[in-house]
Image: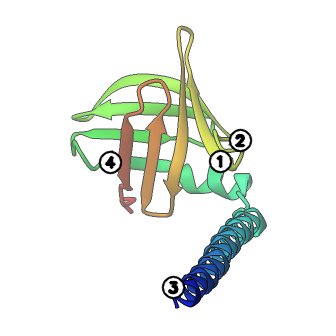
Amino acid sequence: MMKNMLIIALLILVVAMGYGLIWSTQKVSNLEAEMELKAEEEKEAEEMMQEEEVEEINLEESMKVILGAWQSTEDEKSTVVFKDDGTVVDIYEGEELASDNWSLTVELDYNHTPSLHLTRTNEEEVFKYVIWELENEKLVMNYLNSGNTLEYMRVPEVE
């Protein structure tokens, strides 16, 4: 009788170990499947980002849009005027403070995406900006040396 009970106990133990082995193997398989799925999703997301069309920058149009007077949204006494002769004038409370030359270029930014850049030059210094937004009524640019963001609204032309 004792022998039969021992055999039954051993059979139960073998069956339990078999189920445990099957369960652990299935768990590892599920984990591997989850990891493969996640890797596939990440790859698809990366491909989608690469496929997104980069907005083409029309340099000629941008040069037309930037022309004119722009008032600072932070200081209404400060105005910058971009002229079609390639000069830019800083005006504060109606008084001209500085006059530089300006140019627009399309350059690659830190993540290799084309972006619009403004360069202001005078006899002593070069000031470089990346233009974040340029619309008929709004200009937002970032001064690359300091990281300061400058925001302007177009000054309506007086007729």
Residue shown at 56%/32% (left/top)?
Answer: 87
Separation of marks 2 and 3 at Cα, in angstroms? 83 Å
- Residue 14 lies left or right of residue 72; in this view the side is right
- Residue 124 lies left or right of residue 107; in this view the side is left
Kindly report which numbered mark, 1 or 4, lies closer to the viewer in this rendering. 1
Separation of marks 3 and 1 at Cα, in angstroms? 85 Å
Q: Residue 3 in the image: x percent, y percent? A: 58, 84
Looking at the rendered structure, the kind of residue marked 3 is Met
Q: Earlier in the sequence, mark 1 or mark 2?
A: 2
Sort mark 1 into few (<14), some (14-19) or many (20+) by Cα contacts within 10 Å. Answer: some
Helix, strand or loop at label 1? It is strand
Q: Nearer the viewer, residue 42 or 120?
A: 42
Q: Earlier in the sequence, mark 1 or mark 4?
A: 4
In the image as oriented, which residue stretches furthest toward the top?
A: 124
Q: Nearer the viewer, residue 125 or 149?
A: 149
Separation of marks 4 and 2 at Cα, in angstroms? 28 Å
Separation of marks 1 and 2 at Cα, in angstroms? 6 Å
Q: Identify residue for label 2.
A: 108
Separation of marks 1 and 4 at Cα, in angstroms? 23 Å
Q: Earlier in the sequence, mark 4 or mark 2?
A: 4
Q: Earlier in the sequence, mark 3 or mark 4?
A: 3
Looking at the rendered structure, the kind of residue marked 4 is Gln
Residue shown at 63%/71% (left/top)?
Answer: 31
Tag 1 and tag 2, C-beta contact below 8 Å: yes
Q: Identify residue for label 1.
A: 115
